[in-house]
Amino acid sequence: MDSWIFPKLDLAWKTALAAQAARDNKTICIIGVTGSGKSTLGNILLGRPRNDPTGFKTSAYSSSCTLEVESLDGRWLGNGDAIRVIDTPGHGDAWGRDQELRREMVSLLEMEGAVHAFIWVKNSQKPRFDLLELEHFDLLKDIFGVSFYINLIVVFSRWSFYARQERLRRDEGVTLEKAKESLHTSLVENFPWTRDRPVPMATVDACFAEDDPAEASAFRAETASLWRFIDRLAARPVESVQTRRFRDQQIEREKNRLRHRAEMARRQLMPGNTRRAEPDGRCKVL
């Protein structure tokens, strides 16, 4: 009996999770080093002013303003699909608060349960993957397992599409393609599987000038590309290890309950337990 009950049970759980993923807000977790522009990006993705006093706290300096995990609900770019954006403290805190911030991040992200996409905000002027980021990734892997890497998206910050900036970079031989290639190469060195499955990358200038046609056009194109990445990954949200463990325990309890019911039914059908109805409605053991 197990052979047909339990695959159906597992399929039912997976179907329920997929339905929930389609119903609920898409949860986006923003990660990155201190001062990379995570909070500013979070405000922009929610359609808020970049320095919205009711949004994520931002800073013009490289020091961290985000000292705890914060989340805000809203709509993509203010009028799109429903999303929840989680802003996390930057790693590499100048005041040595990394351990304290990490403990809090572990606790609150485990409470969140599942994340549809992780946006890794990466300074385009420092495109190589470094040891500090590796340590931070290890922490997230402890919370979400190796699936965390599969739902990762890179968003380059500090890359202006202003025509003069583009011209100056070209003169110096600096291109966005080279920055992406540099990051991809350093990722392959640490995670060989990314050679055949590159991490998706977008370049969103959260400080773009809305009245500049080139910058506004680039912003629309890059955020559209970013949303396509998120929408694709959302089909398989990443659950925290704790959430998966709890769900697996529930599945196991349900399996045990079904085993017990199947065994009781089997015993009822054994010789000596067969019963038939008498004319007066009572049952008599044969």
Image (spheres, rainbow, N blue to C red):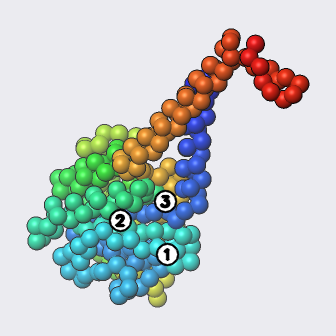
- Picture layout, residue 115 above or below residue 36: above
Q: Amino acid at mark 3?
A: Ile
- Three-letter code, disc 2: Ile
In the shown orientation, is residue 197 left or right of residue 14?
left
Dot 3 or dot 1: first in sequence order is 1
Query: In the image, what residue occupies the spot 62% across and 19% down?
Result: 267
**Callout 1 secondary element:** strand
Which residue, given by chain and number where applicable, does mark 2 sit on?
30
Along the viewing direction, whichever of 178 and 93 lies nearer the viewer:
93
User: Which residue extends farthest right?
Assistant: 279
Label 3 element class? helix
- Locate the N terminus and report the quarter of the image it occupies: top right
Q: Which residue has dot 3 on it?
A: 230
261 is higher (above) or lower (below) than 266: below
Q: Position of residue 133 (x, y in %)?
A: 22, 56
Q: Residue at x 36, y 47 (%)?
A: 241
Q: Is residue 26 visible?
A: yes
In this view, the mark in front (3 or 1): 1
Q: Quadrant of residue 201?
A: bottom left
